């Protein structure tokens, strides 16, 4: 497209100014992070998961909540279909040592190991090192401020923005 002489002159005089505006700066444009919040197993209580999902949505993330009683296979399928960056698993029933690592293992088997998995719920401190060894990056226990969850996501933003 050919610019008119008047438009070309205006652009030439103001191009530096236009390029410096924040909406043209690459460092200002942030990827919208997608997060799946899921409840694996037979756990029927999801108040905490709903709270986290809503708080993360209010913080500007795109959040998908699976609802209760999901299998690890269904969680992984949803995570891949929805092209999420993070999976947050919530569990209160005590099956976290089996179900959380299974989700990570299935993600790896589906070549989706770039999805960052974190967990939350009533999880004894003694179980946390084993969960981390199995690929769950961080565990948030009851009483954790939502700002800690957001800090974790933001600290990993660059990993998921590639």
Image: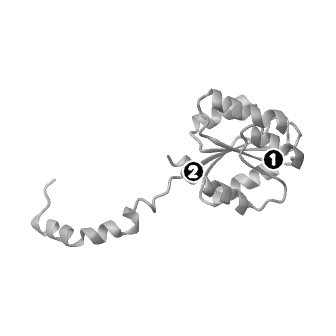
Q: Which residue is more in the foreground, 109 or 3? A: 109
* Mark identifier at residue 83: none
What residue is at 62 percent from the left and 56 percent from the top? 155
Sequence-wise, which precedes: disc 1 or disc 2? 2
* Mark identifier at residue 46: 1
Vertical order, 94 against 8 (above or below): above
What residue is at 70 percent from the left and 35 percent from the top? 104
* Labels 1 & 2 near each other (Cβ < 8 A): no
Q: Residue furthest left?
A: 5
What residue is at 34 percent from the left and 69 percent from the top? 20
Is residue 25 at all visible to an observer of this figure? yes
Dot 2: element: loop
Q: How crowded is mark 1: few (under 14 residues within 10 Å), some or many (20 or more)?
A: some
Would you identify the image quadrant in which residue 131 lies? top right
Tell whether 11 sits left or right of 36. left
The image shows residue 63 at horizontal and vertical percentages of: 63, 49
What residue is at 30 percent from the left and 68 percent from the top? 18
Q: Which residue is more in the foreground, 63 or 100? A: 100
Q: Residues within 10 Å of mark 2 (few under 14, many from 20)?
A: some
The image shows residue 34 at horizontal and vertical percentages of: 59, 47
The image shows residue 1 at horizontal and vertical percentages of: 16, 53
Dot 1: element: loop
Tell whether 93 sits left or right of 82. right
Q: How is the image coloured?
A: one colour
Would you identify the image quadrant in which residue 128 lies? top right
Nearest-to-viewer mark from 1 and 2: 2
- Look at mark 2 in the image and give the residue it sits on: 33
The image shows residue 13 at horizontal and vertical percentages of: 20, 72
């Amino acid at each position: 497209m050919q610019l008119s002489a008047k438009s070309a002159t205006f652009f030439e005089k103001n191009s530096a100014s236009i390029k410096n505006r924040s909406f043209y700066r690459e460092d200002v444009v942030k990827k919208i992070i997608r997060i799946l919040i899921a409840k694996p197993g037979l756990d029927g209580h999801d108040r905490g998961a709903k709270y986290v999902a809503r708080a993360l949505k209010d913080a500007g993330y795109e959040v998908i909540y699976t609802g209760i009683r999901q299998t690890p296979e269904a969680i992984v399928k949803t995570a891949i279909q929805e092209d999420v960056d993070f999976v947050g698993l919530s569990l209160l029933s005590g099956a976290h040592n089996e179900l959380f690592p299974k989700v990570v293992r299935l993600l790896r088997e589906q070549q989706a190991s770039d999805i960052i998995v974190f967990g939350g719920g009533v999880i004894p401190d003694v179980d946390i090192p084993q969960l981390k060894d199995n690929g769950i990056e961080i565990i948030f226990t009851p009483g954790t401020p939502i700002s800690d969850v957001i800090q974790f996501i933001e600290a990993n933003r660059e990993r998921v923005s590639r």
